[in-house]
Amino acid sequence: MKNSGMKICIRMDDITPDMDWAKFLRFKELCDLYQVKPLIGIVPKNEDQNLSIDPPREDFWAYIKALQKDGWMVAQHGYAHVYTTKEAGIFPLNPFSEFAGVEYSEQYEALRLGQNILKEHGIETDIFMAPGHSYDKYTLKALENLKFWRITDGFGKRPYIRNNMVFYPISYSQSSALRAKNGYTTFVVHTNVMEEKDFQRYEQMFKTYKDRLISYTEFLTVEPNIRGTFGKLIEYVMASVKSTLVRMRA
């Protein structure tokens, strides 16, 4: 008998030519075993030294295109992945940002440059992944003008429309998502910082909930709701509370 409950897809952040490839490939093996095709967030011009771990992989862009051909989805993960402000933005999970609090023209130019880098290497996407989950109204305006229509962020049980963009929610907490009886969500994975216990936890999770795992392509077919003013307020409060709890535990 199949498990009923919330459907779960995976997004993998901080994908760069110089990431920790051993950890990435180990997690990829797990995804392949359970036939899960994640969303991966590529940093177009990585300047974050915390993400630079291995020597750059020379066939990086060809490898990414091969993953796309195999059904993996790609998002543009910011531009340089350097936090330039202490603004939390309209989804305040973190009190820092590459974009929130920056003038519109600067945001637009950074996003455009990042988009061009991906295009120069044959990567086309209309999905955006904000570093630190932080963005503001100018980010959304710039994204719309650059013809990005989808964002992997927000809270909820299904995709929703806000500011002419479709948001594909991430989980408020993995444990609550695993207990939920219905809906869709995304688990956020940073393989660079995963430890042995994290791999073991995901291996057990995938095994236990294999009938609830879906590929990101399936998530993109779910009809979105309209997110109203009350829903935006609830989301803002939830993100603020989670941010506070995380800082208290740190």
Image (cartoon, grey):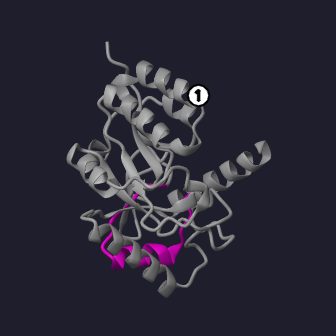
> Percent x, y for residue 30?
39, 29
**Residue type, mark 1 in image:** Glu
Q: Quadrant of residue 152?
A: bottom left
In-front residue for pair 186/233: 186
* Residue reaching furthest to the left: 69
Q: Is residue 223 visible?
A: no
Q: Considering the image in quadrants, where does the C terminus appear?
A: top right
Name the residue at 34% across, 23% down. Answer: 211
Q: Is residue 178 above or below residue 161?
A: above
Q: Position of residue 160 (x, y in %)?
A: 39, 56
Magenta residues (range): 133-153
Residue 173 against residue 247 in the figure, above or below:
above
**Where residue 206 sits in the image (x, y, percent)?**
42, 25
Label 1, on which residue?
A: 196
Whether 198 is drawn above or below 113: the answer is above
Q: Which quadrant holds the N terminus?
A: top left
Where is residue 40 shown, x and y percent of the image?
39, 50
Q: Residue furthest top?
A: 1
The image quarter in which residue 194 lies: top right
Q: Is residue 135 in view? A: yes
Q: Residue at x 38, y 78 (%)?
A: 112
Q: Secondary structure at mark 1?
A: helix
